[in-house]
């Protein structure tokens, strides 16, 4: 009987239940915001705005103890419009949206989407100041931003080594994808005293060929990705023909980083820098 | 007769299912509070309506493709509209044209789908009315070329551009704007009505071209009109909602099993049933998990077992004996 099936179909809706998430209390008068990116969430919490955060993306995981209280609005850059309307934020903060037209769609339904550009290292302090304005937490934001600016400037003040080690940063293994010019990762490598060999490619992230790596002969290979339970490093070491790459020959392939620190342009960027800096400083580049 | 009873059942249950869909949403199940959550209700209504329009377009289109090509595996994307629309969307995203207004992306996708259709038609016609096989073959070829161009674009796009293109290809029923929703609704209604008027011709065509000819049908004209209408319906659907698979393939079979292969009943049933089916799948897609699932996943997960059940029960549902 089709009737039975249709009843079953209707009944399946009942199992689809999702209770509306409880809203955390918000200090009266302060703006309520939704963050669609993990680095923005970190910045908001770092300037003391956790209580004003009425929604986050499923990718937001830091600070871990604060996250469970904040309802999930959607994926990284992919919000559910209905959840947004329920959260009634004063601003929807994002760095990147999956759907190009979403900004306009959000405006149309009466929300206030705000793009916080955060692709490069030098975008971080202005982004924090911008967040401070939206959350009415200017003093905390300015303090944090100027501290970061000083720390970055201090690192830049160190004179570069005559032959900085050539660094290859892989962000994915299949296809082998490297960080190119114009990326936060490239900024981080440069700041740590290395030379990102991907800089010669004018793209953000690009698939690399084994031959290109052999030809450029990096001194250090960083692997900023996970590959299940297997050692990422092992995969790189076992690649055919790479035995003579300087990084592999000299045992300078590194994995097992806290990837949230090294690929996320957030307030913990200096911690990320400290993860890779000693390695780069200890490695002598070849002329 | 069973078929007639099922037909009225589909007609009666479709609005009920649609009403049910309005009660579903990630912010909670039940009718949104009209005072405080009026905007949520409007959002849900437009989304359910979008699902209905796209579902109706895809399943009517699928019915016609299966009937005219006399092939149970035929579906709305056979003549390459999906690849053409995908290429249009990718170009719009890559050139930044899509950022101009919310209408730009669907418009580009739709226009490229129509251009693809014109190209397929032109390639197969040689100055006269094209043959059925010529159409299908040039459809496959044009589709393959468009797909490779699309892949080329994806491979050279930046990470963000690739993200945008892939997101579009997954399909999404959030309507860009009310005028787009209204216009596509009108066009789909017109297209479905046009196909319904052709029911007699479609019935004859399923018997074979010679038989149709002897029944007094102008076979080539009928085939071309039907295919063009069906492809335009698919182009509208792809243009506004991206690639949503499975509806155009399985809903026609389900409806044929339920109401029989007489197109006078089959087309309205497919329009209502397909529309309600997609709206229901979308309601589940945006409700069951905190993060929205692509609606195509749900159409396949729900439609597949339902179809297999009908196949086992009826043994000879329409085409599949």
Image (cartoon, rainbow, N blue to C red):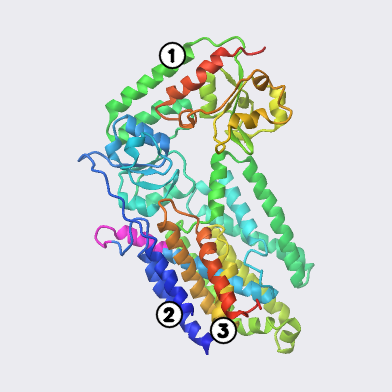
Q: Is residue A285 magenta?
A: no
The residue that disc 1 covers is A154
* Between A233 and B245, the one nearer to me in the picture: A233
Q: Residues within 10 Å of mark 1 (few under 14, many from 20)?
A: few
Give the distance between the C-alpha atoms of the residues marked 1 and 2, in whole angstroms: 72 Å
Which residue is pictured at 49% across the width and 75% down the height?
B272
Q: Magenta residues, as a range?
A: B33-47
Q: Residues within 10 Å of mark 3 (few under 14, many from 20)?
A: some
- Against A89, residue B210 (above or below) is below
Q: Is residue B41 magenta?
A: yes
Mark 2 vs mark 3, foreground winner is 2
Query: Which disc is residue B264 wearing?
Result: 3
Give the distance between the C-alpha atoms of the residues marked 2 and 3, in whole angstroms: 17 Å
Give the distance between the C-alpha atoms of the residues marked 3 and 1, in whole angstroms: 78 Å
Mark 1 vs mark 2, foreground winner is 2
**Are the residues tagged 2 and 3 within 8 Å (C-beta)?**
no
* Between B303 and A55, the one nearer to me in the picture: B303
């Amino acid at each position: 009987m089709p009737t039975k099936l249709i009843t079953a179909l209707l009944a399946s809706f009942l199992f689809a239940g999702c209770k509306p998430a409880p809203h955390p209390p918000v200090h009266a008068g302060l703006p309520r915001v939704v963050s669609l990116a993990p680095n923005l969430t970190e910045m908001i919490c770092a300037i003391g705005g956790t209580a004003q955060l009425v929604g986050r993306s499923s990718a937001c995981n830091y600070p871990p103890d604060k996250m469970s209280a904040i309802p999930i609005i959607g994926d990284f850059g992919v919000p559910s419009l209905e959840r947004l309307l329920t959260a009634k934020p004063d601003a929807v903060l994002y760095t990147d949206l999956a759907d190009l037209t979403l900004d306009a769609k959000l405006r149309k339904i009466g929300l206030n989407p705000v793009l916080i550009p955060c692709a490069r290292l030098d975008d971080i302090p202005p982004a924090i100041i911008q967040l401070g304005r939206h959350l009415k937490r200017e003093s905390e934001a300015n303090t944090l931003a100027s501290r970061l600016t000083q720390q970055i400037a201090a690192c830049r003040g160190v004179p570069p080594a005559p032959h900085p080690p050539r660094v290859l940063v892989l962000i994915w293994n299949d296809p082998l994808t490297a960080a190119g010019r114009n990326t936060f990762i490239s900024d981080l490598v440069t700041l740590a005293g290395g030379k990102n060999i991907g800089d010669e490619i004018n793209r953000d992230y690009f698939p690399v060929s084994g031959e290109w790596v052999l030809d450029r002969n990096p001194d250090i290979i960083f692997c900023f990705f996970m590959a299940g339970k297997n050692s990422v490093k092992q995969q790189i070491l076992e690649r055919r023909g790479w035995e003579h790459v300087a990084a592999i020959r000299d045992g300078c392939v590194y994995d097992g980083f806290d990837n949230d620190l090294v690929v996320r342009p957030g307030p913990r960027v200096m911690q990320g820098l400290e993860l890779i800096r000693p390695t780069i400083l200890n490695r002598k580049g070849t002329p | 007769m069973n078929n007639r009873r099922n037909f009225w059942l589909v007609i009666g249950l479709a609005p009920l299912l649609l009403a049910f869909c309005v009660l579903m949403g990630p912010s909670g199940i039940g009718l949104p509070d009209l005072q405080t959550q009026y905007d949520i209700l409007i959002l849900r209504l437009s989304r359910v309506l979008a699902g209905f329009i796209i579902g109706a377009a895809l399943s009517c289109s699928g019915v016609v493709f299966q009937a005219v090509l006399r092939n149970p595996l035929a579906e709305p994307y056979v003549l390459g509209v999906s690849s053409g629309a995908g290429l249009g969307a990718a170009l719009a995203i890559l050139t930044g044209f899509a950022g101009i207004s919310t209408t730009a992306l669907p418009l580009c996708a739709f226009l490229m789908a129509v251009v693809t259709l014109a190209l397929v038609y032109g390639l197969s016609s040689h100055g006269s009315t094209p043959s059925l096989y010529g159409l299908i073959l040039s459809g496959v070829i044009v589709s393959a070329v468009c797909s490779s161009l699309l892949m080329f674009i994806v491979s050279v796009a930046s990470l963000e551009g690739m993200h945008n293109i892939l997101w579009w290809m997954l399909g999404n029923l959030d309507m860009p704007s009310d005028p787009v929703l209204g216009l596509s609704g009108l066009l789909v209604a017109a297209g479905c009505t046009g196909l319904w008027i052709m029911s007699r011709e479609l019935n004859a065509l399923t018997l074979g071209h010679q038989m149709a000819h002897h029944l007094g049908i102008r076979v080539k004209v009928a085939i071309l009109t039907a295919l063009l209408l069906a492809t335009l319906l698919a182009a509208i659907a792809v243009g506004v909602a991206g690639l949503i698979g499975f509806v155009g393939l399985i809903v026609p079979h389900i409806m044929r099993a339920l109401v029989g292969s007489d197109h006078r009943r089959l087309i309205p049933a497919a329009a209502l049933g397909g529309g309600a089916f997609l709206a229901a799948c979308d309601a589940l897609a945006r409700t069951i998990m905190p993060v929205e699932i692509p609606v195509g996943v749900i159409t396949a997960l729900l439609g597949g077992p339902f179809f297999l059940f009908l196949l086992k029960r009826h043994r000879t549902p329409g085409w599949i004996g």
